[in-house]
Image (cartoon, rainbow, N blue to C red):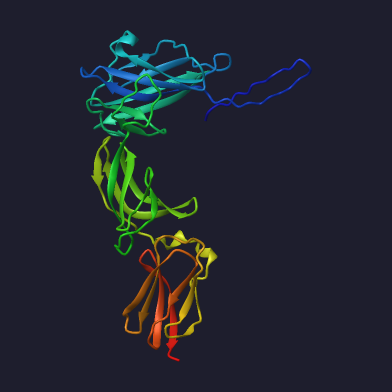
Amino acid sequence: MKKIYFIIILTITGLSIYANPIAEPTISISELYFDDSDNWKLELEYSGTNQSILTIDSVFLYSTSDTIILPKYNYIGSKGVFVITKDSLGSDFIIKRYADTINVVSYSRGHGISSKLIFGNIPGASINYPRKGQSISSFGWPYFVKDNSPTIGLVNDTLGVCGTVKGIVYDKYLKPVQHRTFCLDFIFETSENGEYVSRVYSKPSQFKELYYKKGQGSYQRIHITEIKYVMEPDSIIEMNIYLLDSIISGIDESNYDKSPVQIFPNKASANSCLNVIVDLPVITSNIWLEMVDINGKLIKKNKIRQKNNLIDAPSHEGLYLLNVSLDNQVISSKKIVIKNE
């Protein structure tokens, strides 16, 4: 458990206590890069340092081959990066090019904090070795990503750390999901045909669920058939996504009564005008009204963009069904009686 320290401030006019919790200073692995001769550069990030209050007393660097204590470093400000190399250490410290475990342990007032990177084809590795011109960068602890645009000596950015996945999103009935918003690493939307394109981080990933937009600014998790991929920067992977749950819950079901459709008048004259009210808290871009006759023949189909909708009644007497569908699933069905006058 991290220790918490407090600042006590004395004022001239009296005693004032200002309790300000300070996180322990840490050193973490920020980026690893190998040049064409397999010489390594290791970028370390420090944070929480304050020379007048808390300092980093010592830093140990470990690999599977060696252990060394790092030279004292003059930290400028409370956060920044610095780079170490074999030459800067004055020691033949080995980091293996294609697979290794690197561990940095920083000590402050006797308490050690560890930052570890395991890469390559070895047990526990979170990512493969960097290809020529690539680095391995930390991005949102504890994740590491491949980086096609190394920034050794500078704070990491998002340039060169993403690839692309694309395909079709299918619902639990194996129908394309149209015009819905989802999120893997980043937000994406499906097209009229259920197609999607999404940026993702350059790292091994697997998902058993993703998020979809339920309402205005609200997202909800949904289970999917598990997907796995290993993304390289600036690469493209084609991959369909299959939903295991219904996204009907994209509408707040607690706010409507399972039959959110009203029709006025219900017994109507042929060729008259029907007022259809679709009482849904959230109107999406994929709600349809379908009118069918008693034999199942489609009479008309209208896309719903608002709650109040005017449609023309059929021209022939008979019994009809008015179905409301959301994302290819019927959520309400109403009988309509049409009479000739």
- Residue 193, how many percent across, how many down? 29, 58
- Residue 285, how many percent across, how many down? 41, 60
Q: Is residue 74 visible?
A: yes
Closer-to-camera residue (234/318) = 318
In the image as oriented, which residue stretches furthest toward the bottom? 341
For the point 48% across and 64% down, the residue is 306
For the point 36% across and 75% down, the residue is 300
Q: Is residue 251 above or below residue 89?
A: below
Instruction: State how many labels appear.
Output: 0
For the point 52% across and 22% down, the residue is 48
- Residue 236, how many percent across, how many down? 25, 42
Q: Is residue 80 left or right of residue 228?
A: right
Q: Is residue 20 above or below residue 71?
A: below
In the image as oriented, which residue stretches furthest toward the top? 90
Closer-to-camera residue (331/224) = 331
- Residue 135, how many percent across, how many down? 29, 26
